[in-house]
Amino acid sequence: QVQLVESGGGSVQAGGSLRLSCAASRTTLDTYCMGWFRQASGKEREGLAVIDSLGQTQYADSVKGRFTISHDKVKKLLFLQINSLSPEDTAMYYCAARFGCVARTSGVLRQNLFPYWGQGTQVTVSS
């Protein structure tokens, strides 16, 4: 079992930046992936970025160049740097984890493959 707790959300002006964090209760010596997802009001949850235990990453095409995922394996922290925020980025942001995963795999950002989820942190961007 893995507990995940997100933080770092808030209200920002368009054009600003945010760094979201996710604290994990444990990691494993096995390969794992940790990812960021978001869900805007009235929309389906979408996968944004994933990083695996080797540091390999994969991004959704919609966020490439603007979002950066990283992790601190020692501190068991996952990060998402979001730049050039726009009102379309307003959503609840979630981190998620799964084991036995390699980031550079087709379909790795499918949410139904992730069994562990945090409660989410709200990001609101005003114009």
Image (cartoon, helix red, strand yellow):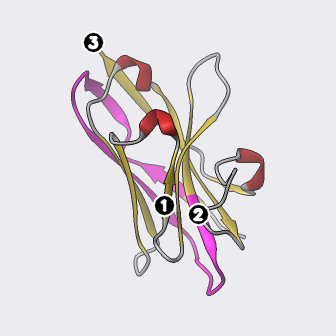
The residue labelled by disc 3 is: 127
Residue 116: percent from the left, percent from the top?
69, 58
Q: Check the image and name the residue furthest to the top.
A: 127
In what element is the residue under mark 1?
strand
Residue 6: percent from the left, percent from the top?
48, 51
In what element is the residue under mark 3?
loop
Which tag, 1 or 3, sits closer to the chain's start? 1
At horizontal 40% and vertical 76% (from top left) the residue drawn is 75
Task: Check the image and report above or below for 113 versus 76.
Answer: above
The residue labelled by disc 2 is: 103
Is residue 30 highlighted in magenta?
A: yes
Mark whose residue sits in front, 1 or 3: 1
Which tag, 1 or 2, sits closer to the chain's start? 1
The residue labelled by disc 1 is: 57
Residue 120 image label = none
Q: Amino acid at mark 1?
A: Thr
Q: Determine which quarter of the picture holds residue 27.
A: bottom right
At horizontal 48% and vertical 63% (from top left) the residue drawn is 23
